[in-house]
Amino acid sequence: MLKEKHTHIRWISAAASAAALALLAACGGGGSGNGSNSTAGSTPASGTTPASGTTPASGTTPASDTTPTNTSPTLAAATAVVDGTTIGTAQWSDGSTSSGGTGQAVNGLNCTVAGAKYSYAHLSIYQDGKQLALPANIGTVVPSMARQTGCVYPVHTVDASGKVRMDVTSNGSYTLGQFFAVWGQPLSTTNVAGLTGNVTAWVNTGGALQQYSGDLASLSLTQHGEVTLVVGTPPAQVATYTWTDPPPFTSTVSTLSFGGLLGTLYFPDGSTGTGSTGATVDGVVCAPGMAETFHVHSHVAIFKDGQWLAFPKNVGITSGCNYELHTHDNTGIIHIETPNVKPFTLGQVFDIWGVPLSSTNVAGITGNVVVYINDNGDVRRYTGDPRNIPLTSLRDITFQIGTPITTLPTYSWYEPQ
């Protein structure tokens, strides 16, 4: 049974906000530039090294030392994308390499529980004109018995969209070199993540594409800024983006208290007739007096046309045993209690409950389903199969069915550790 030990208060700000650092000032993750080159005599943002003095491509003649060569790419019209989108062709495996961030301190960055406020920069990598997808889960370390909450580095990825998520809770600043150190990949003027050749770097400064010729490792990652690394032949155009961000967090805190209720009672308590009755479900075991050596919480909220529907209590609890995944109340907290570290997914919870879960059906409620994942302030839209969402400590999973919600809930958590 649950051993409550303390309350972890988590205030989430309405939106990640900070003044853009001087290198990049892109708006909304991308500028409104449409095929514009950087021009001779333009003044680079403070902290950047202009491309003057670079050797022009063979056969071209620069108009002046600060005029880009005729082979310089232009800035494409902005493409609208949402979190979860894969941008580019797969090239690397997901996650950090064995020489990157696996939990230890890396280049001055510690791996900890996610912070309370996040922003992002964007990184594009091209090889001979082809855009390659930045891998998901760089800088994300899965839970272990010793670190049951898992951890993330202050710069990390969660999908293959190219977004580099940055913890700005303490107004921290980060560099491209730190991100590559967390990734565990090389970064130089001749090698980008194992791709070798002549490397050029470009930054989008408010819709004007500008070549960067300083130390790549020192290039600042700024909020909503875009960095493009080109290996070999440059593309004709460099992509830029506008992002559909999740709704802001509400300033009203919902308390996740044991035995509490959040939302309107809607579903009958307990598992349904087609759900769990004591037999193993999807590999999830039900046993009396099960050891709770590994014990963390996730959370689920379901909104139908703006109305919060309370998650039922006693899902996964029978008269003779408790499942490793279960609920005790109507707060939406999913208790993960098991003798050993095991990966669990949201689909297993719904199978124990005995109700459907898909991109069009949540517990029998059908319609346009949008899913948001929030890891203690690191929030994004999820576009995959909701059954596959991993359950991890302090993870909020919010379903929006029908009418869009205007804010995401903010919670005051309790944790047993």
Image (cartoon, rainbow, N blue to C red):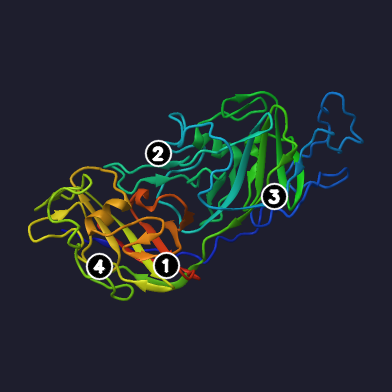
Q: Nearer the viewer, residue 139 or 304?
A: 304
Q: Position of residue 284 (x, y in %)?
A: 20, 47
Task: Tell me the distance, in whole angstroms, between the alpha carbons under discs 2 and 3.
Answer: 30 Å
> Which numbered circle lies on residue 410?
1
Amino acid at pointer 3: Leu
The number of numbered discs placed on residues in the rendered structure image is 4
Mark 1 crowd level (few <14, some 14–19, many ≥20, 10 Å Cα): many
Mark 1 and mark 4 lie on one chain; the one further toward the N terminus is 4
What residue is at 68 percent from the left and 48 percent from the top? Answer: 240
Label 2 element class: loop
Select label 2 or label 4 by which is in front: 4
Q: Is residue 141 above or below residue 265?
A: above
Mark 2 and mark 4 lie on one chain; the one further toward the N terminus is 2
The residue that mark 2 highlights is 103
Q: Is residue 189 above or below residue 395?
A: above
What residue is at 10 percent from the left and 55 percent from the top? Answer: 321
Mark 2 and mark 1 lie on one chain; the one further toward the N terminus is 2
Label 3 element class: loop
> Which numbered circle lies on residue 24?
3
Mark 2 and mark 3 lie on one chain; the one further toward the N terminus is 3
Residue 210 position by quadrant: top right
Q: Are marks 1 and 4 in contact (CB under 8 Å)?
A: no
Q: Residue 332 vs residue 72: left or right?
A: left
Amino acid at pointer 4: Pro
Q: Are marks 2 and 1 in contact (CB under 8 Å)?
A: no
Task: Tell me the distance, in whole angstroms, between the alpha carbons under discs 2 and 1.
Answer: 28 Å
